[in-house]
Amino acid sequence: MKTISMRVLLSVLIIMLFGCSLIMSETTAKSNIKPGSVTKYGEFQRYIIKFSNLIYERDNKEIKIPVFQGTMGDVKYNDFLQYCEDNNILKKGSQESGFIIVTKRGELKKKFHEFLRFYKGNVLKDSDIDRPSKMYVYDGVLEIEYDFLVNSVPMALKITIYTTEDFDTDSIKSVFDINNIDENMKTPEPYFMFTFRPRRTTN
């Protein structure tokens, strides 16, 4: 009888400890977001982020996306959204509209090339970095899109960068050959924007 009681007691304790560890792991995941790792940029739902990796979850799979120049730890994308809601920099139930890379004057093109080479070293390693899946320019705004796979899940990377004029993208052999990037944007500092979208492709 005592043996049965001890077994029941041990089972209850194990369940309680397991439940506590789950709660702690969830709390830890949210508390991984350090002050200064997220900054809202401008009036729209755009952000400067300094995470090491953004982790999306789709089809019961984790999709880990390295963040350019990020050093402040991994975070789940949903925890990032919750953090923004909790800090009143994102409306509840909304989604960010993009991430921002800010540069110094005269260094926008250089930073853009560094960004491309960074992702060529990881999620875009099997993509043709020179020729994106889609590329077009309209009213001084260049849109570049890449399709890729992570853990067998389709993903899309979209980059938005401003140009001094419109041009025919069909004549561009490589994104590195684009010369008319607007280094003198009428903003406090030059920048370009990027977004990642799971289970989406340019087609």
Image (spheres, grey):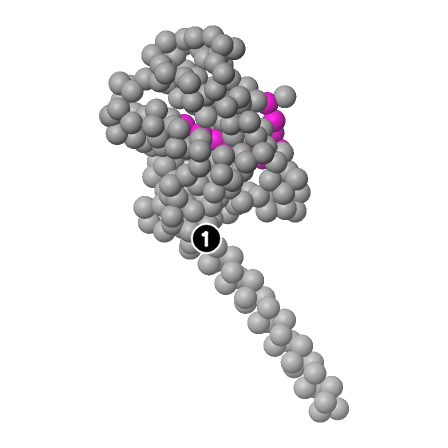
Q: Is residue 151 left or right of residue 160?
A: right
Residue 186 appearing in the image: yes
Please state the extent of the stretch shown in magenta in the rendering: 193-202
Q: Is residue 31 left or right of residue 188?
A: right
Residue 95 appearing in the image: no
Query: Which residue is painted at 62% across and 74% down in the image?
Result: 14
**Which corner quadrant holds the C terminus?**
top right
Q: Is residue 199 magenta?
A: yes
Residue 195 at x, y percent in the picture: 48, 31
Residue 101 at x, y percent in the picture: 36, 32
Q: Is residue 169 left or right of residue 185?
A: right
Dominant SS of magenta comes to strand
Relative to 144, does residue 127 appear above or below in the rendering? below
Query: Which residue is painted at 39% across and 33% down in the image?
Result: 114
Residue 84 at x, y percent in the picture: 41, 41
**How would you rate the neighbour count of disc 1 (Cα within 10 Å): few for under 14, some for 14-19, many for 20 or more?**
some
Identify the residue under disc 1: 30
